[in-house]
Image (spheres, helix red, strand yellow):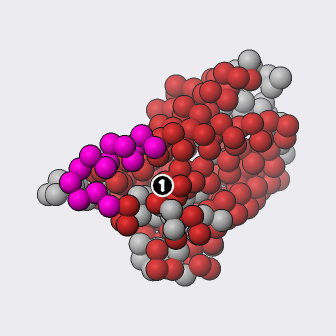
Amino acid sequence: MNARKYAAEALGTFWLTFAGCGSAVIAAGFPNVGIGLLGVSLAFGLTVVTMAYAIGHVSGCHLNPAVTVGLAAGGRFPAGQILPYIAAQVVGAVAGAALLYIIARGAPGFDLAGGFASNGYGDHSPGKYSLVSAFLMEVVMTMMFLFIIMGSTHGKAPAGFAPLAIGLGLALIHLVSIPVTNTSVNPARSTGPALFAGGWALGQLWLFWVAPLIGGALGGILYRWLSEEPEGLVTGSQPAE
């Protein structure tokens, strides 16, 4: 049933947003034993690894509008399912950010002015990188993320290792791009925290929809050109209804 696929996407994106962004909001700068950028990068990668094994057979475990669009552009996902998948992902991301907000505000000194793991450019980039730099980083990183996903889920790739390749790929992406944009490559992940941070985070949210969607489509098209042999849809174990 498609309803189960949508529920799986919502739950998986909830986990990615809550645990990934939670690692940044709660654990990254914790006094003396904070996990830092390396820990946050690994946390995002681990959310994908764990969910890919848990729900990959149900929905394909996209957890990301850019992945859904990229897989469709690569011929590996039905276009008619794009909007329902994206809607489920955004709902899950907002729910994850809401729970994170409720928990995080329980600490003395919590302040949304810190950004609440939102993505940004210019004055709101961790490294003060420009709009152009942020755009290019998000496009290229999302393009390569889709390339990794398409390749690792190909029928001729080593069986059972796709979640590890995809999760490690996302961790690597974060290691490189956190200083530039705080790493999005996922419009749903960006939307959840931005709704709570408000202000500049909402004002800059457009970039973290436009750039990842462009990058995702490019990655899907590029891999489709590179490997013309058709493979099964990435929608779970059931054919799309």
Which residue shows up at 74% across the image and 18% down it?
1
Question: Which quadrant would the C terminus be assigned to in this image?
Answer: top right
Question: x%, y% of residue 66?
Answer: 68, 51
Quick one: 125 or 90, which is closer to the camera? 90
Question: x%, y% of residue 194?
Answer: 52, 58
Q: Is residue 133 visible?
A: yes
Q: Amino acid at mark 1?
A: Phe
Query: Residue 175 occupies which quadrant of the picture?
Result: bottom left
The residue pinned by badge 1 equals 196
Which residue shows up at 42% across the image and 77% down it?
127
Q: Is residue 136 magenta?
A: no
Q: Is residue 105 magenta?
A: yes
Quick one: 235 or 153, which is closer to the camera? 235
| Looking at the image, residue 2 lies above or below residue 111 | above
Q: Is residue 164 visible?
A: no
Magenta-colored span: 98-111
Question: x%, y% of residue 143?
Answer: 67, 58
Which residue shows up at 78% across the image and 41% down it?
82
Which residue shows up at 54% across the image and 44% down it?
94
SS class of the residue under badge 1? helix
Q: Is residue 219 left or right of residue 225?
A: left
